[in-house]
Amino acid sequence: MKLVTVFPKSGACGLPAFPRFTCCSTATGRPRAMIDGETLTNRRTAAASALASRHLSRPDSRTLLLIVTGLLASYLAVAHRAVRPIEAVLVWGCHAQRVQALADTLEHQGLKAKPAADLTDALSVADIVSCATTSREPLIVGQHLRPGTHLDLVGAFTPEMRGPTTMLFAAAACS
């Protein structure tokens, strides 16, 4: 059995929303392990994204666009680089200071990363777009993507949260 604690308002205190996972014996119910929930969630999410990319993105994908500046972002970049020959990482977000901090972090991890000043321009050159957002406004417009771009959507967990526009989904369904 896995018991997950979720505290959505803990971010206001600088704490993770998923502080821990407790794994219990199915025979006795006794706790067997306590695992850092934030790290486990970030690693699992990034691994799932990279696995999808390995099967769905073009093998020659070299440019990754991250539309995310939170803790998950660096995990996503490293995971995608593990399955594709990523040479450049573009970072876009609503807060310039967080975008620059992430680009600097990725540079220190050995990735060639830089802030993307314009989302439309970044979408037009990216081979893989990894969008991990809880934005309620659509950010990705289909006609800004190049044909064959792999779109990795993570983070939205309610119908109101949007990464791409509804028309992008409709166009994908028809192709």
Image: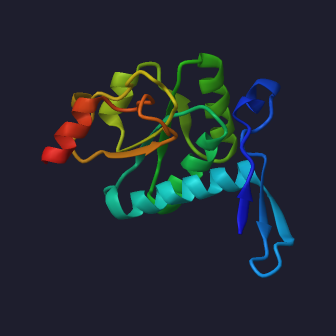
Residue 132 versus residue 160: which sits nearer the camera? 160
Residue 78 in percent (x, y) is at 58, 52
On the question of residue 59 being in view, the answer is no
Tally the numbered discs: 0
Task: Tell me: residue 116, above or below residue 66.
Answer: above
Q: What residue is rendered at 34% in x and 32% in y?
A: 164
| Farthest bottom residue in view | 27
Would you identify the image quadrant in which residue 96 lies?
top right
Task: Tell me: residue 79, above or below residue 30.
Answer: above
Residue 35 in percent (x, y) is at 80, 59
Residue 85 in percent (x, y) is at 45, 56
Indicate left or right for 95 with 120 as reference.
Answer: right
Colour option used: rainbow
Work out which quarter of the rendered image holds the N terminus and state it.
bottom right
Indicate left or right for 91 with 123 as reference.
Answer: right
| Farthest front residue in view | 28
Task: Tell me: residue 29, above or below residue 151.
Answer: below
Would you identify the image quadrant in which residue 34 lies?
bottom right
Q: What residue is rendered at 55% in x and 47% in y?
A: 77
Indicate left or right for 87 with 102 as reference.
Answer: left
Residue 104 versus residue 39: which sits nearer the camera? 39
Residue 44 in percent (x, y) is at 60, 58
Would you identify the image quadrant in which residue 95 lies?
top right
Q: What residue is rendered at 70% in x and 42% in y?
A: 108
On the question of residue 39 being in view, the answer is yes
Indicate left or right for 18 with 139 as reference.
Answer: right
Task: Tell me: residue 129, above or below residue 97.
Answer: below
Residue 89 versus residue 120: which sits nearer the camera? 120
| Farthest left residue in view | 174
